[in-house]
């Protein structure tokens, strides 16, 4: 069908596939009849959020009409959230959130997950057709862009935005917004800044001002960023992203009181966000505001019950709260629940760390020491992968507190090697050494650890630069195993693998190895320039114009999630 035909609203709705999600059968029947009057033939129905996810997992629908309130289980916001995160929708699919709910928190909660439209009941056939036509035409413009985005080929997606601007001037603002977002994710903030500034010359859009604030924040100009976010909030008190970014900027400065105040307002405006309630609870706990931390973590657990964003952090946070209240019995129950529901070695390890901290904070030093001894035994098992940096810092804090020395020193040196150019994190490492009365020794240990990581990385780069590609690839595999969270080593390893692909031609196994490394990088720190550049290089090397690389990335993520180096 030509663009001209679609632009006129003359869209063939007969052969498209529809999913209606509503817990009231009468509403589903009314919507089904409205769609049939438009010529629709393929209409599936779901009476609950869980049933909707099952159907979405089996069929790629062109149009989903989902009620917000679905009774027990997942609500419409949580269905949309999971469909987005699990890529259960085609880039061209339309999602209409339907509800009689007009409250600010419900509308904002749904809007945060970006349905294509939010329609208030009752719905007339004319309104439905008008909204479907409008949204469908827009989705087709973004179809290729969305697919490139899903494939994490952000630079290509940004170029596609530019191409569409030339032929679809009516949608220029939306395309410019998407282009700027993609450029930020690609790690090219100066190009994104140019887009935002160009848009602001025409009109004062809050999303563009917020985007400029993010660029200021990433450049370390936190005060300028805060002024921009505050100006956006003053202009639109419902612009929730500005609240989140403002709180993050305060946290980066260590201004936790200010961050708490901003998150408190954001949580009142849009309380149905699991990540926001988690951040609110963690900030409150850091400040020692136990009642607020408890309320936030409990809400986080409650909301997470049916959400794909369910997080073990809420269980650990609430356990720490219970420890502060000397309710160790409830704390241990929560930790057992976390291990049971989430499973895995890393969750078990974090639960044991939190258990020790709870006992220590509640004054039960004998049990705290026992937890410390068990952690030492876990660390001695060299077959187990070391945890992430934050968990290592928590473990070192506990071990020092219960009188252990060698194991936490080893952990802190490991963190320093994995983050040898991350100044804020290295400051946190030094603070733990200082608290353990090892300040001077800590300075020397951190210095030596940083040098060790640098030497390891430089050896691989030297082999690469001197043309010893096979040896360089092998050495970087050793380096990745030793330092699986070191960003510089991961990026250089991927670059060397790509160099070998240039020399040998496309080899699927090597390409998958490079993709695995880059997916791990993207999980640790999204929005890195080299990530976007290297993914594009892989796409150019792959057969069929990069399709193989994109498909391999999607397969790798689906099978492995964020993988270790």
Image: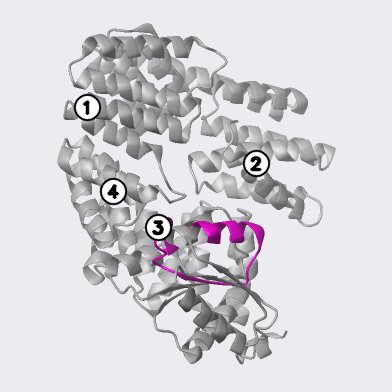
Tell me the tag on residue 323.
Answer: 1
Q: Which residue is mark 4?
A: 299
Which of the labelled discs sits on residue 559, or is there none? 2
Label 1 – label 4 distance at C-alpha: 18 Å
Q: Which mark is residue 72?
A: 3
Badge 3 local density, few (<14 within 10 Å), some, or many (20+)? few
Q: Earlier along the polypeptide chain: callout 1 or callout 4? A: 4
Q: Earlier in the sequence, mark 1 or mark 3?
A: 3
- Vertical placement of 356 versus 250: above or below? above
Q: Residue at x 65, y 67 (%)?
A: 144
Percent x, y of residue 117: 46, 75
Quarter-of-image position of residue 398: top left
**Residue visible at 66% across and 41% down in the picture:** 515
**Range covered by the magenta-colored residues:** 50-76
Above or below, comparing residue 372 to residue 112 in the picture: above
Q: Residues within 10 Å of mark 1 (few under 14, many from 20)?
A: many
Q: In whole angstroms, how far apart are the C-alphas of marks 3 and 2?
A: 30 Å
């Amino acid at each position: 069908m030509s663009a001209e035909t679609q632009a006129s609203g003359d869209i063939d709705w007969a052969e498209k596939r529809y999913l209606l999600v509503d817990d009231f059968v009468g509403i589903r029947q009314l919507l089904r009849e409205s769609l049939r009057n438009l010529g629709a033939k393929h209409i599936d129905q779901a009476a609950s959020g869980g049933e909707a996810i099952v159907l979405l997992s089996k069929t790629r629908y062109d149009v989903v009409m989902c009620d917000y309130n679905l009774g027990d289980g997942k609500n419409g916001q949580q269905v949309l959230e999971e469909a987005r995160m699990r890529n259960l929708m085609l880039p061209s699919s339309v999602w209409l959130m339907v509800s009689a709910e007009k409250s600010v928190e419900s509308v904002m909660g749904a809007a945060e997950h970006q349905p294509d439209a939010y329609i208030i009941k009752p719905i007339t056939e004319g309104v439905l057709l008008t909204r479907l036509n409008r949204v469908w035409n827009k989705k087709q413009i973004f179809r290729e862009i969305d697919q490139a985005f899903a494939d994490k080929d952000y630079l290509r997606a940004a170029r596609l935005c530019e191409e569409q601007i030339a032929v679809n001037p009516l949608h220029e603002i939306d395309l410019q917004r998407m282009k700027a977002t993609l450029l930020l994710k690609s790690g090219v903030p100066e190009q994104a800044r140019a887009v935002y500034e160009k848009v602001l010359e025409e009109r004062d859009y809050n999303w563009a001002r917020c985007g400029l604030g993010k660029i200021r924040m990433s450049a370390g100009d936190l005060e300028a960023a805060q002024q921009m976010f505050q100006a956006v909030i003053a202009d639109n008190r419902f612009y929730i992203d500005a609240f989140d970014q403002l709180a993050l900027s305060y946290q980066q400065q260590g201004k936790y009181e200010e961050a708490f105040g901003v998150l408190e307002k954001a949580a009142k405006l849009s309380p149905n966000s699991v990540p926001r309630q988690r951040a609110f609870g963690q900030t409150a706990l850091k400040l020692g505001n136990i009642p607020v931390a408890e309320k936030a973590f409990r809400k986080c657990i409650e909301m997470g019950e049916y959400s794909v964003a369910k997080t073990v952090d809420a269980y650990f946070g609430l356990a720490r709260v219970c420890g502060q209240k000397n309710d160790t019995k409830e704390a241990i129950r929560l930790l057992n629940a976390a291990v049971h529901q989430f499973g895995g070695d890393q969750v078990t390890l974090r639960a044991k760390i939190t258990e020790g901290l709870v006992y220590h904070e509640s004054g039960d030093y004998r049990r705290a020491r026992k937890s410390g001894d068990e952690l030492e035994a876990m660390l001695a098992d060299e077959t187990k992968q070391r945890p992430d940096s934050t968990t290592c810092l928590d473990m070192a804090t506990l071990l020092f507190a219960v009188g252990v020395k060698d194991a936490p020193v080893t952990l802190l040196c490991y963190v320093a090697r994995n983050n040898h150019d991350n100044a804020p994190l290295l400051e946190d490492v030094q603070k733990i050494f200082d608290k353990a009365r090892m300040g001077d020794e800590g300075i020397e240990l951190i210095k030596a650890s940083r040098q060790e990581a640098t030497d390891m990385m430089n050896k691989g780069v030297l082999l690469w630069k001197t043309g010893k590609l096979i040896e360089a690839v092998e050495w970087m595999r050793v380096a990745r195993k030793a330092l699986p969270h070191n960003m510089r080593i991961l990026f250089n390893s991927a670059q060397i693998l790509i160099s070998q692909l240039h020399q040998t031609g496309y080899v699927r196994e090597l390409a998958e190895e490079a993709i695995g490394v880059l997916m791990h990088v993207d999980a640790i720190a999204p929005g890195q320039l080299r990530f976007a550049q290297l993914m594009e290089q892989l796409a150019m090397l792959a057969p069929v114009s990069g399709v193989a690389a994109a498909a391999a990335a999607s397969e790798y993520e689906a099978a492995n999630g964020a993988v270790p180096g």
